[in-house]
Amino acid sequence: MPSSNAACEDFADHFMGKINAIRSNISSMQNTDLNRPPALFLPEETLGSFVLVDAEMLGRVLSQVNTTTCLLDPIPTSLFKTFYGFFESELLNIVNCSFQTGVFPSACKTAVVRPLLKKSQLDPKNLDNYRPVSNLPFLSKIIEKSVATQLHEFLNAQKILEKYQSGFRKNHSTETALLKIVNDLRLNYDSQKLSVLVLLDLSAAFDTVDHQILLDRLRSLVGLSGNVLKWFYSYLTDRHFYVSMNTCSSRIHEISCGVPQGSILGPILFNLYMLPLGDVIRRHGVDFHSYADDTQLYIAVSPDDLEPVNTLLNCILDIKLWMAENFLQLNQDKTEVLIIGPEDKREMILPHLHNFKPSQCVRNLGVLFDSELDFIPHIKNVVKTGFYHLKNIARVRPFLSLASTEVLMHAFIFSRLDYCNALLSGLPKKSLSNLQLLQNSAARVLTRTRGREHITPVLKSLHWLPVRFRIDFKILLMVYKCF
């Protein structure tokens, strides 16, 4: 789409209009009495003040913040990090002054938003096909990281975080979340039970968070008080954004809701905002797991007792009402259902799912789940995408060094081979054969090895573990990290 100030303004109005429309639609469902149980925990300790940062702590924070530059930064972030020593005392004063006063700097509250096309094949003229990518000043990220470090320590010490929330937590990932879910589903399968997996879809969840509800939750459920609670109020309020494309930009717009996109604290605050949801689900006895705003429910169903299906549907209804009370919109049209188990038994559940239509295959946190849990569709997709990228790398291979080509292999091939590959543990050798073929082909392109030559010595020389051993290594590594 051509860049102009008018186009930027159109994007800004579109992004804000979407959020306002969601909140307007939600209003009609509010004030519903869910008769929810009280929270399963109340804070025994409170966090009323921040520990002031010293030079060593600030240096550690600086090393952990990504080197990304925002248009609002006075100098490039890489340059700032290089000459950090010259600004150390001033930076310390800014961070500690923010902590002592409970005020987040106004200069750090404006975000630069760039529209990004969701998929390359989508119509670039349709504004619905774009997502807003937000960027904040580097100083904002330094202050936020300093706060996040202390907040995480408090949350972990008080065991406040939801047990089944894997998003943005140390030693948690999409892979650990999916491993837990797949293990439970396979246990159901081994017990001759069907499983119903529901992937809930939320519309712009991070952008519709209500500030007053979030602050009340930080006080009553988390235990923030005093200067810390005051700081978070300052952090959330009076925020602004503008859309920028090339040299053009929109006017500055005010943000009245949502957690800051592109921020360090935003994902943490969203997890805390969602804390009561676990209580709502547990009341129904339904298993669940979340990764940020992706929540999935699953139940075991015996062929002679389909009552758990009704329990699941009632749980979804309560979730929908709870989300409406909290200015979150459950998108039922995009919510997906997968029935897992023997094909001859799946049919009996269909009439009991009402408006939900099960799929044969669903994308779950980047992994294709199928009704047999054999991951054949996922493997086919990885192989297809991998060979597409390998073909492109092979075209430019004559112009690249060995080291540069290997970087491309890790970026485009192994990132796909290794993503959530622990889920493939225990699959028969035949199922993994095409993945091994992809790795072998990558080794041949990299080293320019001919097709008739043996590939095993090449893999050894590159120190590339074969696919099956990469899976075993991932499992062993994850077990090691548990201790």
Image (tube, rainbow, N blue to C red):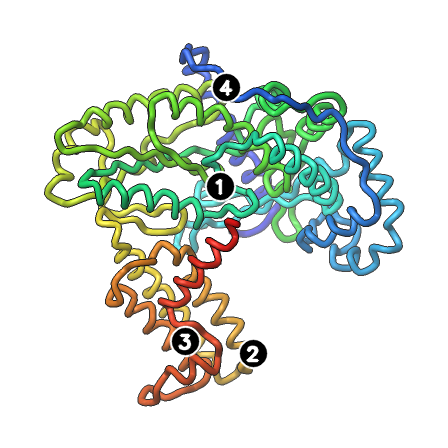
Under mark 4, the amino acid is: Ala
In terms of depth relative to the viewer, which is nearer, 124 or 45? Answer: 45
Q: Work out how far the residue at label 3 is from the one at label 4, CA to CA, in angstroms.
A: 52 Å
Q: CA distance from mark 2 to mark 4?
A: 54 Å
- Image location (x, y in percent) of residue 339: 23, 40
Residue located beneath label 4 in the image: 39
Left or right, 220 with respect to 422, comes to: right
Callout 1 touching callout 2 (CB < 8 Å): no
Q: Which mark is residue 442?
A: 3
Give the Cα separation between the discs numbered 1 and 2. Answer: 35 Å
The residue mark sitting in front, 1 or 2, is 1
Residue type of the residue flagged with mark 2: Ala
As drawn, 22 above or below 483: above
Tell me which numbered mark, 1 or 4, is placed earlier along the sequence. 4
Q: Is residue 311 above or below residue 166?
A: above
Name the element at disc 2. Answer: helix
Contact (Cβ within 8 Å) of mark 1 with mark 4: no
Q: Secondary structure at mark 1?
A: loop
Vertical comparison of 125 with 379: above or below: above
Mark 3 is surrounded, within 10 Å at the Cα level, by few (under 14), some (14 to 19) or many (20 or more) other residues, namely many
> The disc labelled 1 sits on which kind of residue?
Ser
Instruction: Say which element carries label 4.
Output: loop
Dot in front, 1 or 3? 1
Q: Is residue 49 left or right of residue 87?
A: left
Task: Please name the residue that numbered disc 1 is placed on.
Answer: 166
Residue marked by disc 2: 403
* First-in-chain label (2 vs 4): 4
| Label 3: element kind | helix
Compare marks 1 and 2 and give the one earlier in the sequence: 1
Q: CA distance from mark 1 to mark 4?
A: 20 Å
Q: Is residue 331 left or right of residue 149?
A: left
